[in-house]
Image: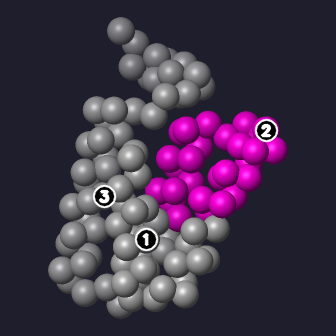
Amino acid sequence: MHVPLFLAVAIIYAVRFPAALVGYAVSVLASVLAVWVALRFTPVTAYVLFTLVALMSIPRDSGPRTSRTLAVIGLAQLALAWSWPPTSPGFEQWLTAVLPR
């Protein structure tokens, strides 16, 4: 729920390039595998991973309407991250250090 941009790009792939959706979903499989083998994979790490994968996977031939829609979704994700940050002990410490109360 923290990464609507990832979901929006997944929908684009599902509609336009269904076979490429398999490669796009590898990051989800990798994150599940990382948790399963007990690697340190926090919600913040997942947030950054899925955001970067989504940003790097936006198709070049996206039309102006799709690009504007993805930009709005990206801004909504930024607002969502600001108002409802992912929880993680490391992130809470960093947030306390950056924004002293």
Instruction: Name the amino acid type tagged 2.
Output: Ala
Which amino acid, mark 1? Ala
The quarter of the displayed image where residue 63 is located: bottom left
Disc 3 secondary structure class: helix
| Residue receiving disc 3 | 74
Q: Are circles 3 and 2 on residues that touch, CB within 8 Å?
A: no
C-alpha gap between disc 2 and disc 1: 27 Å
- Tell whether 24 sits left or right of 12: right
Horizontal arrangement in the rendering, residue 79 relative to residue 88 (left or right): left
Q: Residue at x 51, y 56 (%)?
A: 50
Q: Position of residue 51 (x, y in %)?
A: 47, 56
- Tell whether label 1 touches label 3 (CB within 8 Å): no
64 versus 74 height, above or below:
below
Which span is picked out in magenta? 27-53
Question: Residue 28: image x %, image y %?
Answer: 60, 59
Q: Amino acid at mark 3?
A: Gly
Task: Confirm whether residue 93 shows in the render.
Answer: yes
Residue for point 31% across, 85% down = 62
First in sequence: mark 3 vs mark 2: 2
The image quadrant that residue 85 belongs to is top left
Residue 86, compared with residue 31, is above or below; it is above
Taking the magenta stretch, the answer to whether it contains residue 6 is no
Which residue is depicted at the point 66% across and 60% down? 29
Residue 60 in view, yes or no: no
Where is residue 45 shown, x and y percent of the image?
Answer: 59, 43
State the SS at label 2: loop
Label 1: which residue? 10
Badge 3 crowding class, 10 Å Cα cut-off, few under 14, some 14 to 19, many 20 or more, is many
- Front position in the image: 47 or 37: 37
